C-alpha cells in the first residue's frame, strides 16, 4: 500500500483537541479526534483501520458537532492509499 503523506492542519488539530477535552463527546468521536491530533506535523503516521471506522461512524451520526466532524474528516483523509476490503 502506498503511503499517504497528508498531515492534520492547525485548525483541524485545534478542533481535534476540543473534541478530546469535551465531556459530552462520544467514544468514536474521541478516537477519530485522537488519530487526527496524533498526525499533526507527522507525515509518517496514518490513520488505523479502527480509527477510520470510528471517523466514518462520527461523520454519519446526526448528533455529532461540527467540531467533531471536522476532526473525523481530517483523520479519515489520512488513511493509507490503496484498495479497501472486497
Image (cartoon, rainbow, N blue to C red):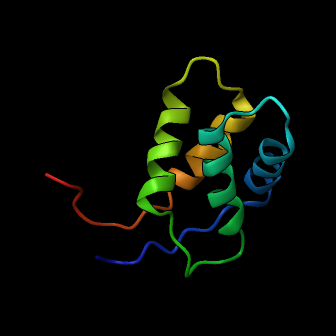
Give above or below for 11 relative to 70.
Answer: below
The residue positioned farthest toward the left in the image shown: 86
Residue 70 image point, x, y percent = 66, 40
54 left or right, relative to 7: left
Say which of 69 and 23 sits in front.
23
55 left or right, relative to 19: left
Give above or below for 5 relative to 52.
Answer: below
Q: Residue at x 47, y 63 (%)?
A: 48
Q: Residue at x 64, y 18 (%)?
A: 63
36 left or right, relative to 56: right
Residue 75 image point, x, y percent = 57, 54
Q: Residue at x 68, y 57 (%)?
A: 34
4 left or right, relative to 71: left
Residue 73 image point, x, y percent = 56, 45
Q: How many marks?
A: 0
Q: Residue at x 79, y 47 (%)?
A: 20
The quarter of the displayed image where residue 35 is located: bottom right
> Split into 4 quadrants, where in the image is the N terminus?
bottom left
Residue 7 image point, x, y percent = 62, 68
Amino acid at each position: 500500500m502506498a503511503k499517504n503523506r497528508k498531515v492534520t492542519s492547525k485548525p483541524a488539530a485545534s478542533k481535534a483537541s476540543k473534541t478530546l477535552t469535551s465531556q459530552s463527546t462520544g467514544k468514536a468521536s474521541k478516537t477519530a479526534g485522537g488519530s487526527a491530533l496524533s498526525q499533526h506535523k507527522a507525515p509518517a503516521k496514518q490513520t488505523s483501520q479502527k480509527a477510520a471506522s470510528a471517523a466514518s461512524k462520527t461523520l454519519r451520526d446526526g448528533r455529532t458537532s461540527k467540531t467533531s466532524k471536522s476532526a473525523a474528516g481530517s483523520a479519515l483523509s489520512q488513511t493509507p492509499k490503496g484498495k479497501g476490503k472486497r
